[in-house]
Image: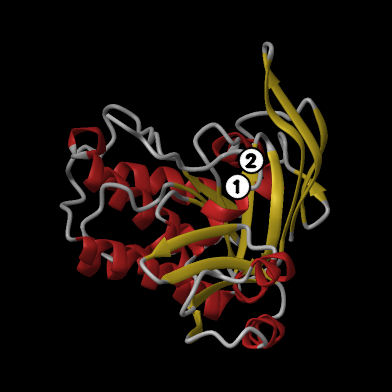
Amino acid sequence: MIKVKNVIKRFGDFTALDGLNINVEKGSVYGLIGPNGAGKTTILKILSGVYRADSGETLIDNKKIYENLAVKENLTFISDDLFFFTTYTIKDTAKYYAGLYKDWSWERFENLKEIFKIDTSRKVRSLSKGMQKQVAFWLSICAQPEIMLLDEPVDGLDPVMRRNVWRLILQDVAERGTTVLVSSHNLRELEDVCDHVGIMHNGKIVLEKALDDMKGATHKLQLAFSDEVPPALLEELKPVHRENYGSVSIFIVKGNSEKIVQTAGKYSPLICDILPLTLEEIFIYELGGLGYEFENIIL
C-alpha cells in the first residue's frame, strides 16, 4: 500500500532522511516511533505531498504522491501543527472538505456530532488546541480516506476523547480496510492500536516488524542465584542490557524464549522467569545498541 524506497531529504546541510525504507500493508495500523529529530514528521509530510523527497521513491498503490491529486483525494494528514482558515467555521471547513474528498459523507458528519459535541457555527481557529484536534479528526473520518497519516494525533485530547477517536479509526480499519500510519511518542498507546511498528533513528529504519514478532524476538529474563550470576551463562546469553535488584537480575535477551530458558536452566537458578516486554522497553533497548540510551545522571 505505502512504499518508501531509499528516500533522502536534506534541509541545507542537515540530512533528515538518509536512505529511508518503509513498507505499510493495506488495512494495517503502522506505528512509526523514534527519538526527536529521527525524521518521522519529515516522511509524513513527504507522504502527504507537503514536501518533495530529494531522491528515492514514495508510492501509494505504486503511484507517485507529489502533485498527484488522484492519490491525495484518498488520504488525510493530521499534523501536530494544525492549520485552519482564519474565518472558517466548522461547517464552512466541512463544506471545503466535501469539495476535496470524493467519498465525503455528510451523514457521518451529522452522526459524529454526538461524539464531538462542538457547535458547528464556531470558528475553528477560536477553539482550543484540543478542540481543534477533535475537529481535525471529525473532518478526516468524514472524508472516508483510504489512508490516514497521523503525527502525534491525540496529543492534547482528554482520555475519553482519545479512546473515542481511536475507536472510530479502528472501526474504519476493520470495516473499510483503512490504512493508518501514525507517529507518536506515546508508546503505551501505540502498543494498544498498532499491528506493525517501525523504529527510526538518524533518518533510517533500524527495525521494522509486526508488533507480535518484535515482542517475540526480544525477551526480559528474570534470574536469581544463591551466588553471583555464572559468567559462562552471560557468555551464552549475551544480554543487551542488565539490571540488578538485590539478588535478582533482569536481562534483556534476544532469541527464542524456550531456548533462553533452557540455557538459563542449565545453571540451576533459584528464579527463572520470562516477563512481558513493553514496546517502550523494546524501543529503549534497540536504540541503546545504537548509542542512543538513557544515562545515569548525577546532580
Between marks 2 and 1 in the image, the one whose residue lies nearer the viewer: 1
N-term mark: 2 or 1:
2
Question: Dot 2, crowdedness within 10 Å: few (<14), some or many (≥20)?
Answer: many
Question: Furthest-top residue in view?
Answer: 12
Horizontal and vertical percent position of residue 177:
61, 73
Vertical position of residue 153 compared to residue 204: above or below: below
Closer-to-camera residue (71/242): 242
Secondary structure of the residue carrying tag 1 is helix
Question: If the image is split into quadrants, where does the N terminus sit?
Answer: bottom right
Residue type at mark 2? His
Front residue (pair 38, 107): 38
Q: What colour scheme has been applied to the protein in the rendered image? A: secondary structure
Q: Quadrant of residue 67?
A: top right
- Please state, as top left, top right, bottom left or bottom right, where the C terminus lies in the image: top left
Relative to 27, is 8 above or below?
Answer: above
Residue 201: numbered disc: 2
Q: Which mark is residue 287?
A: 1
**Residue at (50% x, 77% y) in the render:** 223
Q: Quadrant of residue 166?
A: bottom left
Residue 102 visible in rendering: no
Instruction: Give the total of numbered labels.
Output: 2
Q: Secondary structure at mark 2?
A: strand
